[in-house]
Image: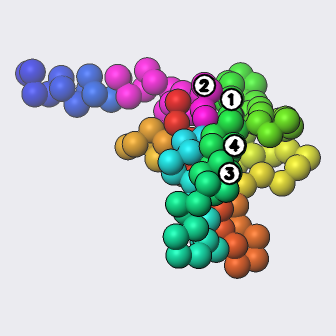
Amino acid sequence: MRRACLPLLVFLAAGCRGGPEGQIAGAWKVDPASVQFNRLGVGADQKQDWIDAKNTLGTIGLTFTRNPNKVVATGLGMASEGGWKVSGDAIEITAKEAWPKLTYDSKKNVIHMRLDRGSETLAMDLTK
């Protein structure tokens, strides 16, 4: 009987978190240590200019709210807002401005942000 109840309890506990939307809701900040740019030359990641740039990107924050699903991005002296929904691991943003690609990693509880511009890619992780 106990073994039969365990899957039911796991299912109910997972449902209490509200699925990925419940896990995503809240305030997130860019982790400066996660910032990567594919166009950096050898040793450029150790230069003070790049270290300062990563720390500046660390001031960017996203706040996701539910009912209604709203997201607000702040940082670098600017703000943007829009709606959001989850589709698989993708977080789809509906806003006036173009937003980077966002994916949610439920195992690590991290949001991956990726901005592609031609052959350049800027990637970073957001954590709660």
Going 49% across and 42% down the picture, which residue do you hit?
110
Mark 1 and mark 2 in contact? Answer it, CB < 8 Å: yes
Between marks 1 and 3 in the image, the one whose residue lies nearer the viewer: 3
**First along the sequence among labels 2 and 3:** 2
Q: Can residue 61 be seen in this view?
A: yes
Helix, strand or loop status at disc 3: helix
Say what amino acid the circle numbered 1 marks: Thr
**First along the sequence among labels 1 and 3:** 3
Between marks 4 and 1 in the image, the one whose residue lies nearer the viewer: 4
Q: Residue 56, labelled with which disc?
A: 4
Say what amino acid the circle numbered 2 marks: Gly
> Residue 39 versus residue 108: which sits nearer the camera?
39
Residue reaching furthest to the front: 48
Q: How crowded is mark 4: few (under 14 residues within 10 Å), some or many (20 or more)?
A: some
Tell me which secondary structure the magenta stretch mostly adopts: helix
Between marks 2 and 4 in the image, the one whose residue lies nearer the viewer: 4
To which residue does mark 2 refer?
26
> Residue 11 versus residue 38: which sits nearer the camera?
38
Q: Residues within 10 Å of mark 1 (few under 14, many from 20)?
A: some
- Give percent across and percent down for residue 113: 62, 52
Q: How far apart are marks 2 and 3 (CA)?
A: 25 Å
Going 72% across and 55% down the picture, which residue do you hit?
100
Q: Distance between the residues labelled 1 and 2?
A: 6 Å
Say what amino acid the circle numbered 4 marks: Thr
To which residue does mark 1 refer?
63
- Give percent across and percent down for residue 96: 91, 47
To which residue does mark 3 refer?
53
Going 59% across and 76% down the picture, which residue do you hit?
41
Mark 3 and mark 4 in contact? Answer it, CB < 8 Å: yes
Residue reaching furthest to the bottom: 119
Q: Distance between the residues labelled 1 and 3?
A: 22 Å
